[in-house]
Image (tube, rainbow, N blue to C red):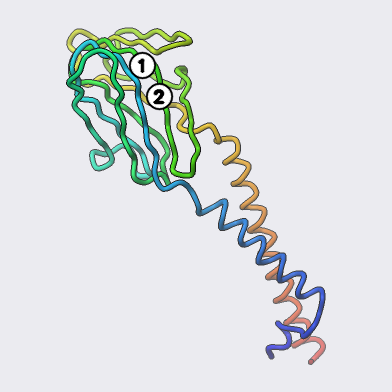
Amino acid sequence: MLKYFWPGKSILFYTGLIVLISLFTVFAKYTFTSPSSCQIDFLINTSAPVDFSIYYDIGKGLREEDQQSKYIEETGETMVSFCIPTYSEMRGIRFDPATRPVQMEIYELTLSYSDGTVFNVPFDALKPGNQIKRHEITEASFFFETEEDADDPTFSLTRIEERQDMNEKRSKIAHYALWICSAVILMVVGRFVYCFFFLGL
């Protein structure tokens, strides 16, 4: 019975087998692989000490379990860094820059993924949320001021990577590869059914 699936030295069979393996490799690469961590760096200027927190959505929403916080004691210009341990399913990031009224200016916001990709977040990708009194975007910085009684101001990032369009293309390639692999498998099974039941080989 094995001969129906493994027909000796058939060039067509071996060609199909190579194509099948190649397509499954492409499918696995673009569907299941992704960076395993992401470092977020903020270069800020703050008017007061703050508790700076970030929340990251890795497919389960924004939860307390998926957040990190740092107390920034220095006023003036300083760098704030976080490392998100898992990026495989990351869908969004929100940051809570303070738990008190504050004025803050962001000069740089960078996402560095473990695959070597670095995304300099444009300032227009910062979306003000709760308790933000005003904000101003220039070429050099993003400035905001919280409300006078603020205790939980928030921002969210509308973009977390520069490769979103590329990821959509890769997703399409993966789906096409899966369909082609399925077609090849059906051809092999069809050959077995034809030879075994109709030709009686």
- Quadrant housing residue 44: top left
| Residue drawn at point x = 34 percent, y = 22 percent | 155
- Quadrant housing residue 68: top left
The answer to whether 195 is drawn above or below residue 52 in the figure is below
Q: Secondary structure at mark 1?
A: strand
Q: Give residue 80's position: percent from left, percent from top.
A: 29, 26
Query: In the image, which disc is placed on residue 49?
Result: none
Q: Give residue 13's position: percent from left, percent from top.
A: 77, 75
Mark 1: give few (<14), some (14-19) or many (20+) Cα within 10 Å: many
Label 1 sits on residue = 106
Quadrant where the C terminus sits is bottom right
Q: Secondary structure at mark 2?
A: strand
| Residue drawn at point x = 57 percent, y = 51 percent | 30
Q: Amino acid at mark 1?
A: Ile
Q: Give residue 21's position: percent from left, percent from top.
A: 65, 66
Q: Is residue 85 left or right of residue 6?
A: left
Q: Amino acid at mark 2?
A: Leu
Task: Tell whether label 2 touches label 1 (CB within 8 Å).
Answer: yes
Q: CA distance from mark 1 to mark 2?
A: 7 Å
Query: In the image, which disc is placed on residue 109?
Result: 2
Q: Give residue 67's position: percent from left, percent from top.
A: 26, 37
